[in-house]
Image (cartoon, rainbow, N blue to C red):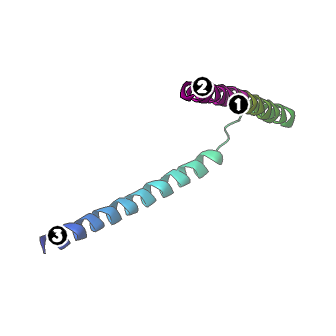
Amino acid sequence: MHLINHITERINLAMAYNKLFIVVLLFLFDLAVALTESTVSCYKIEPGTIAGIICADLLLTLIIVIVTYRCASFRRQKIDNADKVYMNVRANCKS
């Protein structure tokens, strides 16, 4: 019976935290709406600048992927070659 009471208390506590989270989230949402409706001037970014940032990001991501693939391929090839040498040494020792 004590275990059931403990579980019930935990569930009630979790529900209270969920309600608090929703209230805080709604407050922050209302705050964000209020701030966007004010006459604050924002820094304008041109579409060409955004396109340039996206293209540079894609290029950098592609370079990282290619370099990672080449390094992994080189390492895998090195390990495969080492295994072949080891197998040949063992085969020569048996004869």
The amino acid at mark 3 is: Leu
Task: Give the secondary structure at mark 2.
Answer: helix
The amino acid at mark 2 is: Asn
Which residue is denoted by mark 3 in the rendering?
3
Whether residue 12 is visible, yes or no, is: yes
Whether residue 45 is visible, yes or no, is: no
The amino acid at mark 1 is: Ser
Foreground: 20 or 51? 51
User: What is the C-alpha distance between the residues marked 2 and 3?
Assistant: 68 Å
* Coordinates of residue 91 in the picture (x, y in percent): 59, 29
Dot 3 alpha-carbon crowd within 10 angstroms: few under 14, some 14 to 19, many 20 or more: few
Task: Give the secondary structure at mark 3.
Answer: helix
Quadrant in the picture for residue 80: top right
47 vs 24, left or right, is: right
Q: Residue at x 66, y 26 (%)?
A: 81
User: What is the C-alpha distance between the residues marked 1 and 2?
Assistant: 29 Å
Instruction: Identify the mark nearer the N-term, 1 or 2.
Output: 1
Dot 1 alpha-carbon crowd within 10 angstroms: few under 14, some 14 to 19, many 20 or more: few
Q: How many marks?
A: 3
Range of residues picked out in magenta: 69-95
User: What is the C-alpha distance between the residues marked 3 and 1?
Assistant: 55 Å
Work out which residue is located at the far front of the displayed protein and give it. 95
Res 59 label: none
In contact (CB < 8 Å): disc 1 and disc 2: no
In contact (CB < 8 Å): disc 2 and disc 3: no
Foreground: 5 or 29? 5
Q: Nearer the viewer, mark 2 or mark 3?
A: 2
Which residue is denoted by mark 1 in the rendering?
73
Quadrant in the picture for residue 11: bottom left
Res 92 label: 2
Say which quadrant the N terminus sits in: bottom left
